[in-house]
Amino acid sequence: MKRILLIMVAATMMFVGCSDKPKLTPEQHDFFTVMGEKISYMKPDTTVVLATTNKFEITNLDIMENVYQGMRGDVSIMNNVEPSRIEAFLMQVVTLKAQQDILLEEAKRQGLSVSKDSIDAFIEKNLYAPNGGKEAFLEQLELQQVDLDFVREDTRKNMLIMKYIDEIALTDVDINVSEEDIRNYYEENKEQYSLETASVRHILFMTQGKSEEEKIEVKQLTEDVLKRARAGEDFIKLASEYSEDPGSKNSGGLYADFPRGRMGQTFEDASFTLPVGTISDPVETPYGYHIIKIIDHKYGKTIDDVRDEIKRIVSERKKEAAFPPILDELVKSYEFKFTL
């Protein structure tokens, strides 16, 4: 259901989607002073009702935070974009705001709530972790002049909407995932599920541009290092010392999870056919001689391997497809209409 919510608030920023008492910064006030010269109802010092429902109304002040973030505070847009296009964007924001507030009203009517612990867990997973931890996230908030309490309240409202969608709006919707649905999804994504990959470490001894005599010396060095590797010396250290492959030398010769068709044929044959843990005989490619140690093989997944995963994905998609008509009916029951 997260994707539904993201679609609904696509024109807004997460932290400003549900502001109850808009308070403009000096920069925002200047921005809307300029906008108000072309679109009179967006002047920052006046209140204009833009839309109504039978429960609440939406004013220009209610959407200013959203609009400012959606336009990234770029005043030049007012000179480079037709007012009609800006107004279309404003009406989209009004519609999204109304949908969001209607869902919050319904959640409240149903007596739904979210706990402090669940809010904390959501913020930790979805805000702190992806932004480099709590301290880094708080620094971002400070730069945006956003208070953490505001983020918490906004998160509560968004979680409340998701809870309403999951537990109320879609409870009577029959989401049947058939065997045909599962097979169709698997076939459409077969390349993803059937992908075979290998992970190896290798040591490259370059022969490109060398004379025949030099190539013989390189081959001898390859054989000597191979003996040391098979005798149990640390392969990573040997790769760091001897490999002439700039793409992997500093990582101990590692090439991880590459599919067939990515490497030269002889390199690929050794990588995919030798057992895990094996150290190959010298493998010749146009670059030179390689010693290859097989680290891992990953084989494609059958439909039975991923049946439960696919069922969850298809079910989620069907729920998402079922929700817009439900939302449309809700909006209609609230008698939403623009006043301009």
Image (cartoon, rainbow, N blue to C red):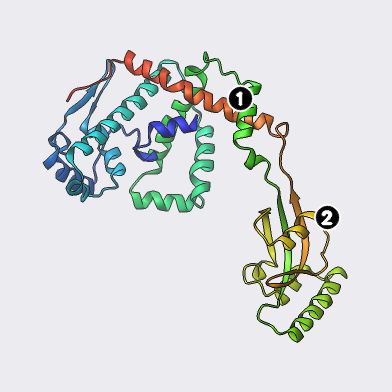
Depth check: give the residue in front, 74 or 309: 309
- Tell me the number on the disc at residue 260: none
**Above or below — where is 292 with respect to 191?**
below
The quadrant in which the C terminus is found is top left
Q: Residue at x 68, y 71 (%)?
A: 286
- Tell me the number on the disc at residue 275: 2
**Above or below — where is 92 with respect to 297?**
above
On the question of residue 113 being in view, the answer is: no
Where does the image place residue 182, in percent across and percent down from the top left? 64, 27
In the picture of the structure, the residue carrying the numbered disc 1 is 181
Depth check: give the residue in front, 223 or 99: 223
Where does the image place residue 202, in percent across and percent down from the top left? 73, 66
Quarter holding residue 315: top right
Q: Residues within 10 Å of mark 2 (few under 14, many from 20)?
A: some
On the question of residue 335 being in view, the answer is: yes
Where does the image place residue 67, in percent across and percent down from the top left? 27, 39
Depth check: give the residue in front, 199 or 190: 190
**Above or below — where is 290 with respect to 89?**
below
Depth check: give the residue in front, 301 or 5: 301
**Mark with earlier residue (2, 1):** 1
Q: Secondary structure under badge 2?
A: loop
Quarter holding residue 303: top right
Where does the image place residue 127, in percent across and percent down from the top left? 48, 44
Amino acid carrying label 1: it is Asp
Q: Secondary structure under badge 1?
A: helix
Q: Residue at x 45, y 50 (%)?
A: 137
Gap in angstroms between the C-alphas marked 2 and 1: 37 Å
Amino acid carrying label 2: it is Pro
Q: Residues within 10 Å of mark 1 (few under 14, many from 20)?
A: some
**Above or below — where is 322 with respect to 71?**
above
